[in-house]
Image: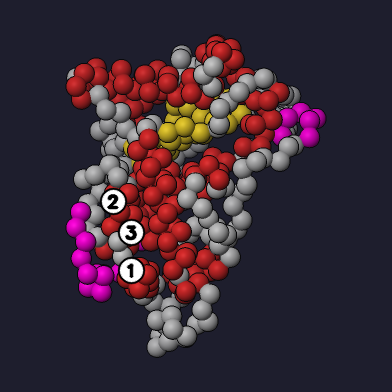
Amino acid sequence: MTSAPLASQPVAKIGNQPRQQSRYKRVPSPHYCWPLKDWLLHLEKSFSVNRGSTSKPYQDIVSLVKGFTDSEVQLLVNELFEKPIGAVRRNLLSPLKDCPKLGADLSKIPASLRLLLYQHALSGQGGNLCTFTLNINETFLRSAAERSCGGDSFTSILNDKIKRELKMVFSDKFGPGNCAIPHYWWILEHAVPDIKGANKGVQKGIKAFHIHGEIVADNELLPTVKAGLKGASAGYSSQGNRAVKFGEPLTYVGKRNWASTKCLTDYPDVVRADRGKYCSHWPESYCVKDIAHTEVAAARLGIDTGGLWKVSSPVVTREATACLRLLNLLVRHSSLATAPYGTSTGFANQ
């Protein structure tokens, strides 16, 4: 990666128990992180970052920007906003006006923002991004819960199982020396009791735990990833659910007429979406919708989860942290977020 003069760059609940409030705060709407994707894409373009050429493109960008003066950073931020007046400008500026002060610690930010940063960290690794849901055999879940009382956390045991199964299938396919597994993140969820039908209000036990996440896999790698995650399901079998199901982090999936029982692997030749079309609904909304319920369920079942989310390696955490620092940079230097239109914002003549 090489940097160039900034000025020359082009312009990225359980039964009857009361619902307890989660310690993970929900991000208010409008989401103050909407500008992050455009900001990251802008930085990649500004510094000629080639996705996939490094496992830490955002850390590399942070390292470069740390040497800039405030005026240079301000110029870089201003270039991002050199866009036509209208929806683009509103979408970039409005969320920033009420943006809270964010630190640089992933453990101290809202869950939805943390998962969104994980998504951005993965999308910088090269390759296509898949959403996935993993169901796990009840017997294995009970075993993991019992083992979690002896030291290892529940989610750590599940994550070790996922890593082990992925490494096994990748080693079988590509050879022992080429079995590096794809980067991923996931969050534990406990299914909320049914609100209608014969099972209305029935509390669900340990078998209701499952996983939602994202993993880097293009069409060629996806069958191998699927085999690994099916192994991690420990023989899960259900008439109504698949052991593992893949999708894409998009808003327009419905336009492909995929029925709810379908999976990305049912369409092996589908043209995968460019990451510029990825949306944040999966990490910031769907994956965090039942956090409070999941915490209550785990406590009721006497399970020490050790936290609800896991990643494939420290690389994902470091990259997500770098994304958070870059978001802070945008917020801190964006005088555009508070300045009236037409006053030193670069929009006076538009």
Q: Is residue 194 left or right of residue 245?
A: right
Q: Is residue 140 left or right of residue 61?
A: right
Query: Which residue matches tag 2?
Result: 60
Main SS of the magenta part reads loop
Determine the CA span between mark 1 and mark 2.
17 Å
Amino acid type, label 3: Lys
Determine the CA span between mark 2 and mark 3.
10 Å
Query: Which residue matches tag 3?
Result: 66
Q: Residues within 10 Å of mark 3 (few under 14, many from 20)?
A: few
> Where is residue 284 drawn, in percent x and y?
53, 47
The disc label shown at residue 133, or none: none
Query: Which residue matches tag 1?
Result: 69
Indicate yes or no whether the magenta region holds residue 16: yes
Q: Residues within 10 Å of mark 2 (few under 14, many from 20)?
A: some
For the residues bearing labels 2 and 3, Cβ distance under 8 angstroms: no
Chain part drawn in magenta:
1-18
The mark closer to the camera, 2 or 3, is 3
**Height in image: 22 above or below 87?**
above
> Where is residue 299 drawn, in percent x and y?
68, 25
Determine the CA span between mark 1 and mark 3.
8 Å
Q: Classify residue 232 by image quadrant.
A: top left
Task: Tell me the residue at 43%/63% (across/down).
Answer: 330
Amino acid type, label 2: Asp
The mark closer to the camera, 1 or 2, is 1
